[in-house]
Image (cartoon, rainbow, N blue to C red):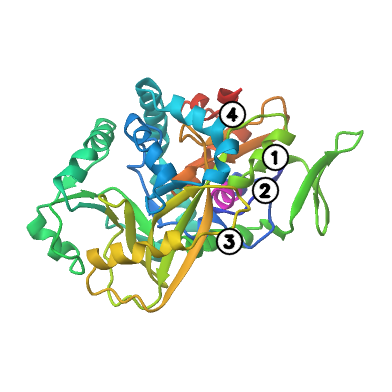
Amino acid sequence: MARHFTVLGAGTVGVCTALQLLRDGHRVTLIDRAAPASGCSYGNAGIIQVGGLVPLANPGILRQVPKMLLDPEGPLLIRWQYLPRLMPYLLRFIASARPERVAHAANALGTILDRAIEAYRPLIQQAGAWDMVRETGELYLYKTDAAYAAAASAHALRRAHGVKMEEIPVGELSQLEPCLAPIYRHALLFNDCISVRDPAVFTRRLADAFQAAGGTWIQDEITDLDSNGSGQRHLIGATGRHALDELVIATGAYSKPWARKLGSYVPLDTERGYHLMLADPGVETQRPLIFGDQKFGAVSMLGGLRIAGTAELAKLDMAPNYARAHRLLGLAKEALPDLRTDKVTPWMGHRPSTPDSLPVICRAPGRDKTYFAFGHGHLGLTMGGITGRLIADLAAGRTPPIDMAPFDIARFS
């Protein structure tokens, strides 16, 4: 029997969830204050990263926390002003770095990432968006033996979970990626990763398919949720009240207040990610490139070359520090010597990060007809399709294909 779902949040996760519910035969309304893919989904590197099962919290990164506080040029910075407010998150982050917790998180992420690409296929087919997809893999590059050795434990964890990696002789790199400088000593190709030519355009194509199939799109800034004496719920927005039957919260880094309003606690914080877009780069990559020494990436997209990889932990409303992004230009010029850097646009977005690197995908505890789908960190694009599929399974009473307990918000209570 068809029901009515409202999905709050039109990033990749929200759009995919709305489309999956619509494909199950339900009536679906998608609401956001801005156009689809206007937030974090706009500025990522476009990778369906099936090898992304290594949690951010791990024993190796704990040794780097002091440097994060002191080094403004590092790949991840913690703003001093934000430290007192961040402490509850950091304490859980440190606890999540224990080996047994890392193994648990990697196992859980592995189960969901194994299904990430397959869950996207019907959505891409419906949107006619295969022209947006590259199946050329993802290439990790290391200039030094030390950087390659430092990544060994992460790659071993990936291999243990069946992630396929091919060691590429450095003499063959110029054939794979002619734009690269001949400075790399090690290279690993993740053949099973796919990528999209522009994550915002890709997500908007899915949103267009949602509307073409009968889904309802409403642009409104939602500020509250209420219910009257009869139990009828409404979302309260700038343009009016929107009647609710069933609700999915997919508001990314802005989900913590909604969870609180619905009676759940989540130590969700924002990892502010930066990128630079070079409109006339003079070079083109054949696939996403990840530079392991300095932990940044470069990938050709529809609008030019995107350089991404620097982040900081800071308040949602703190002004962007675009110097964080511009520091990448010199690194990129070293990697891609023919790169032109005269047409550069910086960007900053808010990744919704949990301390254990696991998203929240579940029914809202103690709340009828309400679901959570947020907290995907670096993997929102990667997990969009499968998150939508899992929410649709939960809504339909179907047994999901994976154990959902690691993704339940109750783990934080």
Nearer to the camera, 314 or 120: 314
**Residue 41 appears at what percent x and percent y?**
52, 56
Q: Distance between the residues labelled 4 and 3?
A: 26 Å
Within 10 Å of disc 4 (Cα), the crowding (few <14, some 14-19, many 20+) is: many
- Is label 2 in contact with label 3 (beta carbons under 8 Å)? no
- Badge 4 is on which residue? 409
- Badge 2 is on which residue? 8
- Is label 1 in contact with label 2 (beta carbons under 8 Å)? yes
Please indicate whether residue 246 sits to the left or right of residue 212 in the image: right
Comparing labels 4 and 2, the label whose residue is closer to the camera: 4
Amino acid type for the residue under numbered disc 3: Ser
**Residue 292 appears at what percent x and percent y?**
26, 49
The residue located at (59%, 46%) in the rendering is 253
Amino acid type for the residue under numbered disc 4: Ile
- Segment colored magenta: 13-19
Q: How far apart are marks 1 and 4 (CA)?
A: 13 Å
- Is label 1 in contact with label 3 (beta carbons under 8 Å)? no
Please indicate whether residue 289 sits to the left or right of residue 308 in the image: left
Q: Is 235 rendered above or below residue 393?
A: below
Sequence-earlier tag: 1 or 4 = 1
Within 10 Å of disc 3 (Cα), the crowding (few <14, some 14-19, many 20+) is: some
Within 10 Å of disc 2 (Cα), the crowding (few <14, some 14-19, many 20+) is: many
Give the quarter of the image for residue 352. top right
User: On the rendered image, what quadrant is the N terminus found in?
Assistant: top right
